[in-house]
């Protein structure tokens, strides 16, 4: 996050001095706060999610209710997405306005214990305020993107000469237009991956389903059907499993850590938990 802030300030200064920083940051903040505030409605409508009650889907509702009751956290709204692609996500601006959604596909391929691990992961996202953290990161990344666009248009129309208010010149122009957006994306994706690791750890601890969550992640990773996010890649980071195809992407540009690393960490945490349990008994 600090890296994004520094990068945004440097990019704005290279481009248009202090004025450039404030203009880009203001525009990006307004855009992302709007998205943050209405994120639950927008995302759920995008995937045609239907809210369910205990009577409509007793299995999913019961699992969410049991975990929230045991952990003494607010009960989110529960939704089902009409898709055979197995996945799940959490959305909402805070823990009192949150929703957990599961696809029909994930309900079909996971047993109850594995599903508990997945729901624990999503509830951990809510408790960790990951939607807010993602919005803040997106605000700075968006500001940098706006500055980059300004730099490109300025270069086209020849509007960039060095003066007292700019730290620019040709180097500043290249940084603002080309290099900064790439670095911002790398940092934003790194934040997303770290939040996934944290949600895995805390969600598994919440439910005591370390191995079951690991098993669920492997099933989701190997599923032949993927969610079609061609028109909405911005929601990819919400999903518990990378919704894109299995084609290997450079890990630094991925919203999710490698599933092998996630499974490895969960196995290690399971062993640590078991060891601590024996120690407490002793």
Image (cartoon, rainbow, N blue to C red):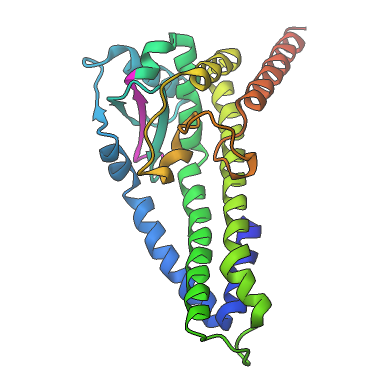
Residue drawn at (75%, 13%) of the image: 275
Q: Position of residue 111 (x, y in %)?
A: 44, 8
Q: Quadrant of residue 14?
A: bottom right
Total label count? 0
Q: Nearer the viewer, residue 265 or 235?
A: 235
- Near-viewer residue (35 or 178): 178
Farthest residue, direction front: 156
Residue 248 sits in quarter: top right
Q: Position of residue 106 (x, y in %)?
A: 40, 18
In the rendered view, tell whether residue 145 sits above or below residue 191: below
Q: Position of residue 257 (x, y in %)?
A: 61, 34
Q: Which residues are magenta?
A: 94-104
Rendering quarter of residue 194: top right
Figure quadrant of the N terminus: bottom right
- Residue 126 drawn above or below residue 144: above
* Of residues 128 and 114, the one drawn nearer to the viewer in this rendering: 114
Residue 160 sits inside the magenta stretch: no
In the image: residue 218, left or right of residue 106: right
Assign the C terminus to one quadrant of the image.
top right
- Can residue 10 be seen from the camera position used here? no
- Residue at point 42%, 43% (across, down): 233
């Amino acid at each position: 996050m600090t890296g994004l802030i520094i990068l945004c300030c440097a990019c704005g200064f290279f481009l248009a001095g202090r004025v450039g920083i404030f203009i880009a940051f203001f525009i990006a903040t307004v855009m992302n706060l709007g998205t943050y505030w209405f994120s639950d409605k927008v995302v759920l409508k995008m995937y045609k999610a239907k809210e369910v009650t205990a009577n409509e889907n007793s299995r999913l509702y019961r699992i969410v209710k049991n975990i929230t009751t045991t952990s003494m956290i607010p009960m989110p709204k529960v939704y089902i997405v009409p898709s055979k692609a197995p996945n799940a996500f959490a959305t909402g601006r805070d823990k009192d306005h949150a929703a957990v959604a599961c696809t029909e596909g994930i309900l079909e391929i996971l047993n109850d214990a594995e599903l508990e691990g997945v729901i624990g992961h999503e509830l951990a996202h809510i408790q960790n305020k990951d939607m807010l953290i993602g919005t803040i990161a997106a605000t700075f990344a968006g500001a940098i993107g706006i500055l980059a666009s300004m730099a490109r248009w300025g270069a086209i129309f020849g509007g960039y000469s060095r003066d007292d208010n700019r730290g620019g010149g040709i180097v500043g122009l290249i940084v603002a237009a080309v290099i900064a957006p790439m670095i911002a994306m790398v940092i934003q994706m790194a934040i997303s991956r770290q939040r996934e690791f944290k949600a895995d750890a805390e969600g598994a601890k919440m439910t005591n389903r370390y191995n079951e969550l690991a098993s669920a992640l492997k099933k989701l990773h190997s599923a032949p059907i993927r969610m079609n996010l061609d028109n909405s890649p911005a929601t990819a980071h919400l999903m518990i499993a990378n919704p894109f195809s299995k084609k290997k992407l450079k890990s630094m540009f991925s919203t999710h850590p490698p599933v092998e690393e996630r499974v490895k960490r969960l196995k290690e945490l399971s062993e640590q938990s078991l060891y601590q349990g024996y120690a407490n008994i002793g």
